[in-house]
Amino acid sequence: MFESKDEPLLLDFSIPLFRDSEPLQIVGPVPGNPAAIRQFTNLADWRSYVLGLQLRGSTPKVFRRKHNHVLRTLFLAWLDANVIKLAELGGLAMLEGAIRARYPEIKINKKQPGLECALTHLVEHGGLNDDALRETGARVSHNILPARDKGGRRLNEGGSSLSNVRNRLAHGDPFEVMPWGGLFEVIRDLVDFMYPAPEKGGMSGST
């Protein structure tokens, strides 16, 4: 029961236009630096950044809507940076769904459940390589799947591969670490790789 001495959880619903004294900081790719620290002090600049993460290919409408939900959540991080972690989890869930829709032949693999199974199929059968992520500077061998030895055992359980990030967000404390640098750019590029924009004069693959 609420007591007068307790501080209310939400004191002000107003949206500040500027954060000069406390800029919103994220790590993300910029030309020449895949892990630059970016600062946002102006709401308009933050909005422009989030809009730049929109899908650019012929993604089916259902996943485009899901991705837009993720971006709306990310935009709310202007009020509280912790919201980024919720957007990360939503973005990775959307990514897994998009992969499985693109490759319906994927079967559930008990050794590689969920997102890892889908990403493995994308790498081994979908033709994914480093060129697809050239814009973000990410590398498939280091950023998409966890490294494994010749026996198939993971070399680094705490690595920053997408599947490990997803597991830490879903099964651990989603707020225990800083936002994952470049995550939304990689998600966008992976979905655009699977659902490329149609050639000029062609038909869109969206449904």
Image: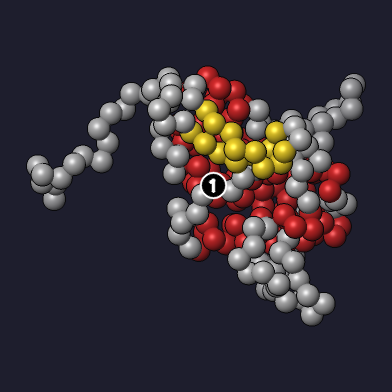
Residue at x-position 42% and y-position 31%:
22
Say what amino acid the circle numbered 1 marks.
Answer: Pro
Q: Secondary structure at mark 1?
A: loop
Q: Which residue is mark 1?
A: 179
Query: Which of these two is toward me, 194 or 169?
Result: 169
Q: Is residue 51 visible?
A: yes
Direction from residue 76 to residue 98 in the image, left or right:
right
197 is higher (above) or lower (below) than 188: above
Query: Which of these two is toward me, 194 or 48?
Result: 48
Residue at x-position 79% and y-position 54%:
140
Query: Which of these two is toward me, 45 or 70?
Result: 45
Classify residue 61 by image quadrant. Answer: top right
Q: How is the image coloured?
A: secondary structure
Q: Position of residue 82 (x, y in %)?
A: 44, 44
Quadrant location of the C terminus? Answer: top right
Direction from residue 13 to residue 27 in the image, left or right:
right
Number of other residues with Cα within 10 Å of mark 1, as a class: few under 14, some 14 to 19, many 20 or more: many
32 is higher (above) or lower (below) than 114: above
Residue at x-position 65% and y-position 32%:
53
Q: Position of residue 67 (x, y in %)?
A: 61, 38
Residue at x-position 56% and y-position 39%:
26
Direction from residue 44 to residue 95 in the image, left or right:
right
